[in-house]
Image: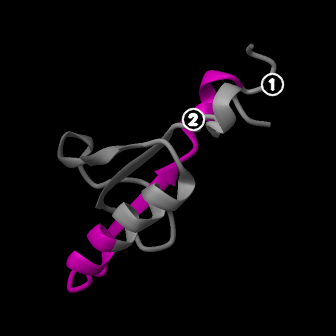
Amino acid sequence: MTEPNNVPPQLLHLVIGGELRHLGEPVFRDLSQVEFVGAFGTYEDAKKAWKARAQATVDNAHMRYFILHAHKLIDPRGDAA
């Protein structure tokens, strides 16, 4: 589905990350230290940002970054028009 003038729809993706309490579960050690990397209109752009931050913190095994598909939270049924 595209918008008028062949502009693809904007799908909001958020990239966040921080230090986890344990490696086996996605629970942050300190929510006040969670980093907001950015908001992106495509998954591809979000993945580039996620990869850059993940690689920059590779020395800390507890650091994890996540891509949140915020467009699904805003319109979970996909019927907004």
Q: Is residue 62 above or below residue 31?
A: below
Q: Secondary structure at mark 1?
A: loop
Given the image, on which type of amino acid does mark 2 rest?
Answer: Gln
What is the quadrant of the C terminus in the image? Answer: top right
Q: Earlier in the sequence, mark 1 or mark 2?
A: 2
Looking at the image, which residue sits at the far top?
81
Kindly give the residue lying farthest to the front in the view shown: 5
Residue indicated by mark 1: 77
- Report the mark closest to the observer, 1 or 2: 2
The residue lying at 81 percent from left, 19 percent from top is 79
| Vertical side of 12 occupied by 29: above or below | below
Does residue 26 appear anywhere in the picture? no
Amino acid at the residue labelled 1: Arg
Q: Which residues are magenta?
A: 52-75
Q: Position of residue 62 (x, y in %)?
A: 31, 73
- SS at circle 2: loop
Q: Quadrant of residue 57?
A: bottom left
- Callout 2 crowding tier (Cα within 10 Å): few <14, some 14–19, many ≥20: few
Q: Looking at the rendering, which quadrant does residue 50 occupy?
A: bottom left
Q: Which residue is at 44% across, 57% downward?
A: 45
Residue denoted by label 2: 10
Horizontal side of residue 80 vs 22, given as left or right: right
Tag of residue 39: none
